[in-house]
Amino acid sequence: MATTGSRALPPVMSCTNTKALLDHTTFPAWADALRAEAPALFRAGFLALLPGPLLDSAARAFAGTGIGWGAQDVWPDSSPPTGELPAEALAHAGCQAVMCGHHERRRRLGESDTDVAGKAAAAAGQDLVPVVCVGEREEGPAARAVTAVLDQAAPVLETLPADAPLVWLYEPAWTGGAGAPAPYPQIAEVTAALRERCAGRTGDTRVLYGGAVTPGVLTRALAAGAGLDGVGIGRAAHDPARRAAVTAELLDLLASREEAAAPDPRKAPT
């Protein structure tokens, strides 16, 4: 994940939550594969969100590559917890970001929207980028998804400093079992609602979509009008061909934004 200082985010981003799919025996080969793709992943703002036991390995594996990495959770306050990961410790370990509010933790551990907001604020307090997961639990109308996402987002926006960087990962919980992404017009509606709600923020804000992401999902979502900055990649991040295909889509998005931002030579000052 390319950054300029502690508070700037890349224009295009991607992330993967490895869950517990990797351990000390399988991580080295995966990291080697990522290092071989580092120039492209760097430009795609790639961020690997890893379990605690692999953070030290990530620090060594990704040093100097431009590949970003961080943790899958953080303790929400400054008290010394038992068996948890305080934001200060994650920062000292070299993490750049931390995931907050994954739907599995919300469902299985009872994490509330207020808990998630506290985690995001704790991360920001240590110059870690909070990657805040939002999304409806069950499949349904787009309006219901928008309401659910904005309800989850509200405490975060109330708690997080307005100048802190923030990444939203819209990941409907039901898409994992469905094996297909949310409807593309729905992704567009949720993305637009999040952007509107964040309009007053001064810190960098990015909106990603996650949930059954495979090659083509980002391109189709963008074609449907979704104002996405990238995607969260699940198991596709462990398949070299699919990872490369999604990265290529992200680089196409980056190129289109760079082209749009370039000055028009026909309007050069005289």
Image (cartoon, rainbow, N blue to C red):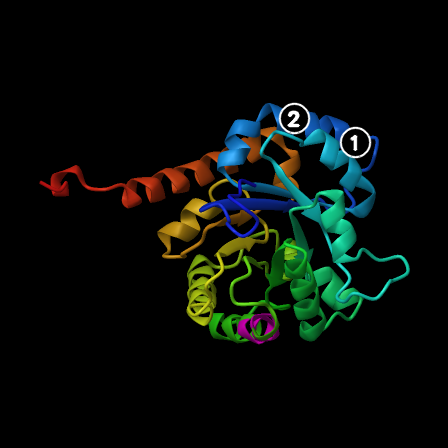
| Residue type marked 1 | Thr
Disc 2: which residue: 33
Asked whether residue 153 is drawn in magenta, I would say yes
Dot 1 corresponds to which residue? Answer: 26
Q: Nearer the viewer, residue 22 or 3?
A: 3
* Res. 22 visible in picture: no
Question: From the viewer's perspective, is 176 left or right of 144?
Answer: right
CA gap, disc 1 and disc 2: 11 Å
Q: Quadrant of the C terminus?
A: top left
- Say which residue appears at 67% left-offset and 73% top-offset: 113
Q: Residue furthest left?
A: 270
Mark number displayed over residue 85? none
- Residue reaching furthest to the right: 82
Q: Residues within 10 Å of mark 2 (few under 14, many from 20)?
A: few
Residue in the foreground of this view, choosing between 50 and 77: 77
Location of residue 142 with respect to 3 vertically, above or below: below
Q: Amino acid at mark 2?
A: Ala
Image height of 87 relative to 2, above or below: below
- The first of marks 1 and 2 along the sequence is 1
Magenta-colored span: 150-157
The residue drawn where x is 55% and y is 43% is 214
Front residue of this view, candidates 95 and 92: 92
On the image, the x and y values in percent for residue 104 come to 73, 61
Location of residue 132 with respect to 37 vertically, above or below: below
